[in-house]
Amino acid sequence: MDSSVIRAAAYRFGADLCGFAPIERFEGIAPEHNPKSIFPQAKTVIVLGRRILRGAVRVTEEQSAVSPYIDFGLSMLEDQFLPKTAYDVVLFIETNHFDGVPIFGYDVEAASKVYMADPVEAGKPAPNVYVDIAHAAELAGLGRVGRHGMLITPEFGTLQRLSLVLTDMQLQVDPLCQVNFCEDCQACLDECPYALERKRCAECKTGAIPTNFGHFNAIDRNGAACSRACLNALEKRGLLTRKFQQAFRAEK
């Protein structure tokens, strides 16, 4: 089957982004973070993304409301809308007589701190194996990981959430994104109150959101000052393909 058929189906199921990486691009990644440890028969890694609504982040930027982002940009998007898209893509793959394994986009750093179980046998990583979702998206050609550690895409900047589907279907893959979004820019560094010191993100009062144990108490940063500064800089530099009537950040 052609990857364009899978991509078209993913878009029908609500995806805004869909990229394909050969499993070989993950060679050299530690077993505890390697998708091949989850599904050794995998030939293709499909990365799905759904946009975070720009308006929900814009009202956070303007300090008028944070609940639209928490509700529609974080909790419902990550826990309901995006998993449904991944589920439907796997159903489509199975209908075509191949296997698909849906993978939730956990924060790999936070998840790796939580003990779940011992390895089932010597030489295998302990459950659960957590894939670095932003790096996987980069390997699938969707964008590049910025200096702030979040994925930047040409379509949405930092405003997307991601999930994976591993499949034993051999599909045409996408080229890597060649845009250097961070070249000659340090807007995220300049506006982060802690100079991008990740261990201090929990202290951030500029839009970072603490999650619960179901998300391994990770700190969500897509609506934080670093992400918003990046989005504003990307728009001003003309690096985003999607244009809006009004600038993300109003001139003061």
Image (cartoon, rainbow, N blue to C red):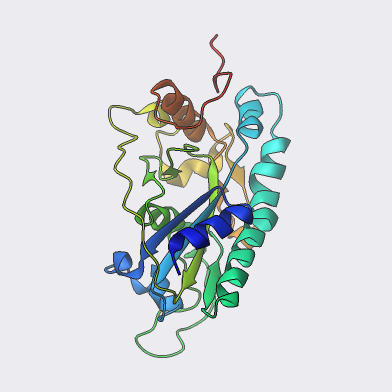
The structure residue drawn at horizontal position 43% and vertical position 21%, both measured from the top left corner, is 236
The structure residue drawn at horizontal position 53% and vertical position 73%, both measured from the top left corner, is 101
The structure residue drawn at horizontal position 47% and vertical position 28%, both measured from the top left corner, is 229
What x and y, as percent, mark residue 157?
Answer: 47, 37
| Viewer-closest of 249 and 8 | 8
Q: In this rendering, does residue 191 appear at all?
A: no
152 over 42 or under it: above or below: above
Quadrant in which the N terminus appears: bottom left
216 over 23 or under it: above or below: above
The structure residue drawn at horizontal position 39% and vertical position 29%, both measured from the top left corner, is 239
Toward the top, the furthest residue is 252
| Viewer-closest of 113 and 1 | 1
What x and y, as percent, mark residue 14?
Answer: 63, 52
What x and y, as percent, mark residue 146?
Answer: 37, 41
| Viewer-closest of 136 and 123 | 136
- Total labels: the figure holds 0
Image-based side of 167 in relation to 57, left or right: left
Q: In this rendering, does residue 74 appear at all?
A: yes
Quadrant in which the C terminus appears: top right
| Viewer-closest of 169 and 64 | 169
180 over 22 or under it: above or below: above
Image-based side of 190 in relation to 225, left or right: left
What x and y, as percent, mark residue 112?
Answer: 47, 65
